[in-house]
Structures are given as structure tokens and as C-alpha cells.
Image (cartoon, rainbow, N blue to C red):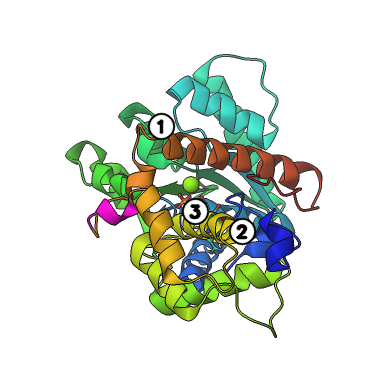
Amino acid sequence: MYKTYYGLKENPFNVNPDPRYLFMTPEFEEAFSGLTYGIQTRKGIISLTGEVGTGKTTLVNRLLDWLQQHRGKTAFLFNSRMNSVQLFDFVLAEFGIACDSQSKSNRLMKLNQWLLDRFRAGETAILIIDEAQNLTFPVLEEIRMLTNLETSTQKLLQIVLSGQPELEEKLKLPELRQLRQRIMLRCKTRPLTKQQTHDYVCERLRIAGASTSGQPIFSAKATEIVHLYSLGIPRVINLLCENSLINGYVEQKLPIEPDTVEAVAREFQLDEVEPIAPPASLQPGTDVYSSEAFIQNLGEALSRFRLSTTRESLPSRGRK
Ligand SMILES: Nc1ncnc2c1ncn2[C@@H]1O[C@H](COP(=O)(O)OP(=O)(O)O)[C@@H](O)[C@H]1O
Ligand SMILES: [Mg+2]
């Protein structure tokens, strides 16, 4: 285990959304403020977009925590592959609205009544959909219709659509013109800068128990290389650093220098990536992609469980 060798209590670069590891950059803070402002001022629909691995789901989890503390009633859909009927099923189930009728108009009326009750009680209801780039046109149209539920002055349901840049492209299509016009606020997650990447790596190591007074685990030059190959995308930074720790331990390297990180980047073919293309490790068809996707889905499912039952953090899931 590399943990003992590097003086760590846990794996610093797990990809599960553990709130203790939340790293706040000004850009992340800005996106978070945008979301909370939009919800508080009942803007209706808010979009959150950013490249794969830049922290959208992390931000949504942070938002769910915040909403729980602010008496928000949330429905969080992280599986966006659904049809219109399933959308209603999910929304009613997530909000805990009982409805025996299968008729759409009855279900909509129930939802409307429930939203009005929440509004009168001074509560805000929020529907959050992650991976929203996968939503089909009919489902997006239903979502637009949900924003018609309103009092004479206020939107009753706040909606956050979180997704990859394809979501923005989709919303530009003429078929979705009406939906696009209802998006009152657009928030974005962005890759980390070189300095932020360095600080992110140090901060994760510190939280995992690394000594802050002794020898750094990654040399400053090594974190520069991490930035170069990860393009500042946190998920790829985690992948590079985790594997550099494993290889660094095998080779007994302290501190970890650029050559170790470079070897990992080559192993995952990150050295063949065009600067603006998604990293090869995240493209479909590779083992890394499936395991990353699996871990992400599992992490999200677990975090929902965590939010609804206990506020304790999750046990860490090591790769070794
Ligand atoms: N602001 C952040 N603070 C800490 N870790 C982050 C942050 N943003 C991203 N990460 C890490 O990167 C991983 C991928 O982020 P994620 O939120 O799943 O990205 P996206 O949903 O945009 O694909 C997370 O599981 C987490 O480990
Ligand atoms: Mg995500």
C-alpha cells in the first residue's frame, strides 16, 4: 500500500464525491452562487454546463447539501435516460407525492397542488437533472411545460439542467427555441489553471493526512506535468495522481517527479490527446472509461443515499 510509504491515512484521489475534499476555486464559487441565486430568486430554469470531469456533479452535490440546510424540497434525477412518463414518475416519487391515478392530467394537478402548498409554506421546490444532454426532445418539452406551473408572479418549480457542452448545442436547435428562451441563468464549470491544479493536488494530499511540514509528495514540476496532461480537469488529475502514487511507491520515489507522471500519462494515452479533445481515457470503448463511468454512477448513487439517510461521509473505496 502506498499510503504508509507516503504517510497518508486514506486514498487522496478517489473519484467519489466526498464533500470533505471539496476544492473551491473562484470559478466554482461563482457557479455555485449563480445556482443558489437563481433558485432563491425563482428564475425558473438554470443551466449548468462544463466538460466531462470538471465538477458538475460535485457542484450539484454541494447544492443538494445547501438546499437541505435551506428547507429546499429537491428531486434529483441523475439518470437522464427516461421517457416523459418516467419523468413524471420520478418527479412525483422524488418529491414524495402520492398519486394513484395514472392519468397525466391528474398527476400534473397533484404536482401543481403540492407545489402551491410548498409555495404557501415558504418553501422552494427544485428539480435537478444531471447528464441533461441525454434528455430527448419530448422530455425536454415536458420540462418546459413544468415551468408553466406558476402563480401570477412566481415560478413554482425551479429547475437545474446540468450537462456536458452538448447540452448547450442541443438547446441551440430550433425545436428547442422555447425552452432556450426560458433559461434565465447559465452557470459553468471550468478546468483548473496550472496554479489551481497544484493547489488542488496539495489540498487533497493534506486532507488525506499528508504532512504539510515535510517533503512534498509531488514536486512542483510534477504537478505542472499533471496540469499539462489533465488539461486541468479534476477527474483526470485524480486519475494521474492516483496512478503516480501507485507507481511512485513501486519505484520508491519521494518526491514524485515529472518522469513518473509522464509514464502514467503515456500508460493512459493522455500524451496522444489533442488539447481541446476530451481525454482519451474518457472516450467510450476503453476500460478506463467504463470503470470511471461505473465509479461515478456508484458515487452518485451512494451520495444520494448519504444525503437522504445520514450526513456521515462515505467509507473510502480504495483501488488497491
Ligand atoms: N471542486 C472540486 N473539488 C474536489 N474534487 C473535485 C472538484 N471538482 C471535481 N472534483 C473531482 O473530480 C471528479 C469528477 O468530477 P464530477 O463532478 O463527477 O465531474 P462532472 O460531473 O463534470 O463530469 C469528482 O468525483 C471529484 O473527485
Ligand atoms: Mg457528472
Pointers 3 and 1 in contact (C-beta within 8 Å): no
- Which residue is rendered at x = 41% and y = 32% of the image? 142
- In the displayed structure image, the side of residue 101 where residue 314 appears, left or right: right
Which residue is the site of mark 1? 142
Mark 2 falls on what kind of element? helix
- Image quarter of residue 108: top right
Is 65 covered by the magenta stretch?
no
- The residues colored magenta run 270-274
Q: Position of residue 92 (x, y in %)?
A: 62, 30
Please tell me whether residue 276 is drawn above or below residue 220 in the rendered image.
above
Disc ID at residue 62? 2
Instruction: Name the amino acid, label 2.
Output: Arg
Look at label 3 and name its amino acid: Leu
In the picture of the structure, the residue carrying the numbered disc 3 is 239
Q: Residue 100, percent across and down? A: 67, 15
Please identify, in this view, whether the residue under mark 1 or under mark 2 is nearer the observer. Answer: 2
